[in-house]
Image (cartoon, helix red, strand yellow):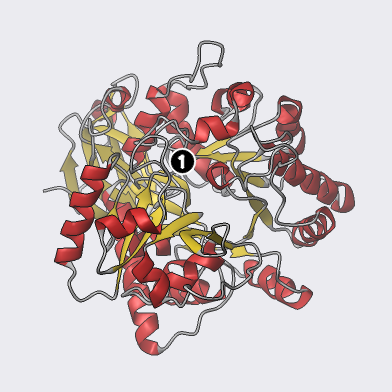
Amino acid sequence: MAERIEIVNARMAGSGAPLSIRLDGGQIEWVGPPEDMPNDANITRRIDAHGQVLLPGFCDSHLHLFWGGVTLDQLDMLQITDREAATSALRAFASQHPDEQLLCAFSANYTFLGAGTRPDRHALDAIVPDRALLMMAVDGHTAWANSAALELAGLTGAVPQLRGAEVVCDASGVPTGELREGGAMDLVQRFAANGGREGICMAGDEPTASSSDRARDKATLRRALEACASLGITTAVNMDGNLYQASLLGEMAQAGELPIRVSLPMRIAPHHDAARIAALIEAAQQPPVGKLSFGRIKMFMDGVFDSWTAYRTDDYPGREGDRGAPLFTPEQFNAICCQADAAGLQIQVHCVGDAAVRATLDGYQGAQQANGTRDARHRIEHIDLLHPDDLERFSQLGVVASMQPVHPPGSSGLPLEPTVSIIGRNRWADTFPWAALHHAGVPLAFGTDWPTAPLSPFNAIHAALSRQPWAPDCPDQRLPLSEVLRAYTAGGAYALFADEARGHLVAAQQADLVLLSHDPHDLALDPSACHATLTICAGDIIHKVS
């Protein structure tokens, strides 16, 4: 049972005004100036904040809990930008894991071996010649395997034809080592120490799982949730939804084992038949269980720019006639939108290219025309590229923009190339349009897409505040700190229909709070300028720095 807690001598973000707060039964009972706090003899715990900044708990509006938990045992390549550093890190990791059949790394930049390069099996063989190695790109849509890994997976002879995925081959039909999308990566990932379970929830299908698998998968989720709590995240909008993960999280929620709130969609994929779609829509309608909630479906409309799979309205530079392709046909996507919307569900769709955004808005508009207007708050995830003609459609349709400040090239350890050239110089002004959407009245919800980027909200806030235009004629899409914090708190709550319950420091809202060591304004210059010293979710202390 939640305690009666008082936090005294805190400060408000922005104004720096003194602030104290009282929590009871998982709710905020009182908040105001310290000198006005009424006495209460029944307080069970009193915490002196010593002038630290108090905020509503962070809502990461787009992350992958299970996949992120898996990567906690893998090599993080995000900050590695040259061949020497890559060689040192990979060989050290190999020596530290002598018994693993497949070495796994993640968050590798496409040019981590040097500007103008792209990894292949030969380059990886030169670094790790005697062990199977699989390295996932920073966007999670491409991976690279060395020759030993390809041999381990049986990919040295005939290469399977895959739907929505590709084992890239050279002109003679020999695999280069590049694997695009989950269906190709899974062919190698299954030999990892964790059984290749990174993608078990990404396609919306159900894995075969023994009792030991279930226990291990719960432990993976638990580690991910604890990592969130340590960073002040009290709500995680998980993108890995399927019936299997719903059952794992449901059991954990029922047992009171979720330290933070988790919102889980059901993922619908293009290969799902009518019966499967109906089952997932029905599962998405189940009521909340403790801190676990449903109410949403998730789809992918396209891929990413670095593999030329983002769906755009114009040709890729140097690739006449190539605009990418949607993963759903318009008829299929619109039918699913109408079906899910009629069931009262929220729809969220991965859209990187501007044609993907347009096709998704068309589906939402079709659902509205078929079912009538309601407060649906359908979402579009990412929006790396937006055609100016579609800006006003967001507010007209009541769509939420779920975006990640860590995604623009040049931010959070990401190099500019090759992405900015693949996007094309003539489209730079249309990329990652946070400010344009905000000024058009579109609700914003921020997150990280962890583990494609660090989980830390402080790193993401730094990325949002420090982003620079790629050229003088590009608009500055930065927002002031107050709006960045809103997108990470109240904006996330709004996107979950929870704005009446949390996201603000006001009486009667749920007691989800984070105490920051320093003023978040300092994050504009340094992503490590502050950290979470105290995290409270539903009135329970789930993280505390001694």
Q: Indicate left or right for 191 with 346 as reference.
A: left
Q: Is residue 62 left or right of residue 278?
A: left
The local secondary structure at tag 1 comes to: loop
Q: Give the labeled residue for mark 1.
A: 503
Image quadrant occupied by the N terminus: bottom left
Q: In x, y percent, where is residue 399?
A: 68, 40
- Work out whether residue 490 or residue 453 is closer to the camera in this orientation and state it: 453
Residue at the spot x=37%, y=75% of the render? 217
Percent x, y of residue 442: 64, 31
| Of 206 and 38, the residue lying toward us | 206
* Apparent side of residue 231 relative to residue 150 in the rendered image (left or right): left
Residue 283 in percent (x, y) is at 64, 72
Residue 406 position within the rendered picture, expressed as x and y whole percent measured from the top left: 42, 37
Residue 316 versus residue 39: which sits nearer the camera?
A: 316
Please tell me which residue is depicted at 38% across the width and 30% down the height of the picture.
463
The answer to whether residue 3 of the structure is visible from this angle is no
- Extreme residue toward the bottom, this view: 210
Asked whether 201 or 85 is in front, the reply is: 85
Amino acid type at image mark 1: Gly
Residue sitting at 41 percent across and 62 percent down?
A: 67
Residue 54: quadrant of the picture: top left
Farthest-out residue, front? 172
